[in-house]
Amino acid sequence: MIAFLGQGRMGVPMARRLHEAGHEVTVWRRGTGVSAAEAVDGAELVITMLRDPAAVREVLAAARPGLRPGATVVEMSTIGPEAVRELRELLPAEVGLVDAPVLGSVGPAADGTLTVLAGGDLTECRKVLSVFGTVRETGPVGSGAALKLAVMSALVPAQVLLAETFAYGEAHGVSPEALADVLSGTPLGGLADRLRAPAAETRYALGLAAKDLALAAWDGASLATAARKRLREAETAGLGDRDLTAIARHVMDRPARRTVPLNPATVPATNGAYSHAVRVGDMLYVAGQAAIGERGEVVGEGDMAAQSEHIFQNLSRILADQGATFEDIAFVRTYITDMDRLMEYGAVRRRYLTGTPPASTTVEVSRLFRPGLLLEVDLIVALR
């Protein structure tokens, strides 16, 4: 028996293909009243096709009590090699793990023409995976996930680049048809055709493309970082569930603005009266960060080291969102309520600001905007 966990755009046609191939398939999705553990009970193969690493971890943790010894989990979502390694630690040792993300969208999923990038021992699942399309064995567990992100790191930024190319052409009187016709004679021709006529049906959601680029982020990936920024802007504009090709019209219709407010989802939300950061060209201005938690509570009340650590963790997430590091900081300003405790703050700060320090100002203030807060830190950052 095969348990298929996840019945989204890709999961439904993939599970249907298994059924049509003669396999006994149990499907599961959230909100059905059946637990993940019940869904996998007795299954020889458990296939997951879910949105992101957090969803996969949550569902497999819930399914773990129902996994039979000797079963194999085939993880087919796009979650990256680090998340695959975490799954190996999460699953019982007697349960096998194969990572097998796919290249292709809803149409190929229905037709059985996906490319399956499979890492790990495929002995128990090779025949089943062939139902979905061409199986490419990539090596050890995690290698399929790494190869998938490497491919998307090229394909997604290329589509964003072409969206900007069409926007440039339109702004200078070049028709999309003429530009696409010229591009058809280049290696970018196929992608240009897709961007010229954006898909009405969502095949590869723009929000998922942004997620994939975030998973593939690495130091030095400047093109992918810029493309991810464009996609996040489009997501904020409500295009997250639209097909990725919607990025073309978004870029062409988007009015130019000098400032771009930023509020990364990895940082606790603001009160709505300010943004965590604002990007102006190649400069990033980070608002004062304080030790405020997810529920608006003061973190580490009375503990200077704990509040400092919380602040620098927030700063690191804001910087990472823009492809920056602490080395890119031009100026740091600290407001502290008790200068006698400066050494406690400094010990934490030195773990993050290593090497030659940036320009800096530290001032003592009588109080901050919430009782219990001991310090607040803001930055000016030069982006690459």
Image (spheres, grey):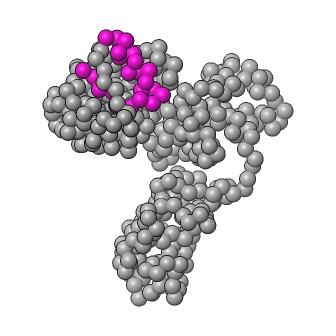
When asked about the image quadrant of residue 86, the answer is top left
Residue 31 forms part of the magenta stretch: no
Considering every residue shown, the one lying at the far front of the view is 33
Name which residue lies at 39% across and 69% down: 309
Figure check: 268 above or below 171: below
Relative to 228, 313 lies left or right = left
Relative to 278, 143 lies left or right = left
Q: Nearer the viewer, residue 108 or 363?
A: 108
Q: Nearer the viewer, residue 15 or 38?
A: 38
Can I make out residue 47 in this image?
yes
Label tally: 0
Residue 12 forms part of the magenta stretch: yes
When asked about the image quadrant of residue 166, the answer is top right
Figure check: 341 above or below 379: below
Relative to 334, 352 lies left or right = left
Name which residue lies at 39% across and 16% down: 17
Q: Nearer the viewer, residue 311 or 199?
A: 199
* Residue 322 screen position, x and y as percent: 55, 53
Q: Nearer the viewer, residue 285 or 96?
A: 96
Name which residue lies at 41% across and 21% down: 14
* Residue 180 screen position, x and y as percent: 72, 23
When asked about the image quadrant of residue 272, the answer is bottom right
Can I make out residue 230 in this image?
no
* Residue 48 screen position, x and y as percent: 34, 31
Name which residue lies at 64% across and 33% down: 246
- Per the rendered image, the range of residues in magenta is 1-22
